[in-house]
Amino acid sequence: MKSSARKPIGIFDSGIGGLTVAHRIIRDFPDEDIVYFGDTAHLPYGDKSEELIRQYSLRISEFLIEKGCKLIVIACNTASSVAHDELVNSFGSGTYFVNVVDPAINGITAMADVSEVGIIGTQRTIGSDVYSLRIHRLKPEMQVRSLATPLLAPMIEAGFFNNKISRTVIEAYLNDPSLKSIQALILACTHYPLIKKQIHEFYRGYVRVFDSTDFISKEVGMILDLHGLRNDKKSMKNQFYVSDLTESFEKTTRLFFREEIVLEYYPLWEASKSLSL
Ligand code: DGL
């Protein structure tokens, strides 16, 4: 086995939503070490400019590379939509990136029984049109109905899910006429797995519902195997860093990760003040 296979997998998000993706990767790859970075100081990314999201993503990727990561998973649809290509171009061929958009697109376009798909996500993800453009590249005949649902991530962060308020907001969005004849819906935000149950309840089986965690492991496994990077034994405790640490983040973490973890404050932006980030 290559010595680089022993290195950790880096995962990052605008905050703690990406922990849903981290949780799935840890479950599916128990021998891998994980370094997670949640940019809680800049949350949410969904309403930031593309330029700023790219700058944040570049700096976080540098940090994960400094931590020795062999592969970086962009566990945020917003950053995946607007920063993935720039990251690949900036760091060259020696650094491997996996975004959460392409695995979902590969998955959905491979489903022969889905001809019309809905996409819901942040303003920036939907505004980038990345899902629609890439789906059409692979399957031009597929109908794509994209809808920005900006209230959902803050609502979930504030602890409103599996209750009446979240049901009302979810229903208001999903009743949008543009989604009326979809056969599948992609939850294109890593916060949304927390409301997947209520979305299932809304559709009562008429629409298949997918989120980023449904597709990510296949892609991660493929990249690890392709480059001989699969580890066969954990050598450290998983590390979870955030750029701002408050009681509320610590509390919410449990909802996203479903297990006890310790968040560690890392002042990434202190060291970057000269870059005016
Ligand atoms: N988790 C982010 C995503 O997947 C959304 C939250 C945010 O706006 O930062 O897009």
Image (cartoon, rainbow, N blue to C red):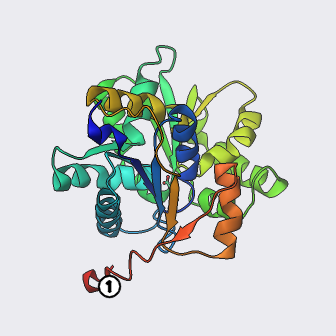
Badge 1 crowding class, 10 Å Cα cut-off, few under 14, some 14 to 19, many 20 or more, is few
The residue drawn where x is 31% and y is 67% is: 59
The residue under the point 47% across, 49% down is 34
Q: Is residue 242 above or below residue 104?
A: below
Residue 186 visible within the image: no
- Identify the residue at image location x=69%, y=50%: 259
Q: Quadrant of residue 174?
A: top right
Q: Quadrant of residue 253?
A: bottom right
Q: Going by the image, does 46 lie left or right of 64?
A: right
Judging depth in this view, the residue of 100 and 174 nearest the camera is 100
Question: How many marks do you count on the picture?
Answer: 1
Image quarter in which the C terminus is found: bottom left
- Quadrant that contains the N terminus: top left
- In the figure, 49 relative to 85: above or below? below
- Closer-to-camera residue (256/122): 256
- Tell me: 170 left or right of 184: right
Of residues 120 and 144, the one drawn nearer to the viewer in this rendering: 120
Residue 14 pos. (x, y %)? 47, 62
Q: Which residue is mark 1?
A: 273
Task: Estimate the x, y position of residue 136 in percent, counting from the top left.
Answer: 32, 30
* Coordinates of residue 189 in the picture (x, y in percent): 52, 49
The kind of secondary structure element at disc 1 is helix
- Position of residue 37 in the picture relative to residue 209 (left or right): left
The kind of residue on which mark 1 rests is: Lys
**Can the viewer see residue 202?**
yes
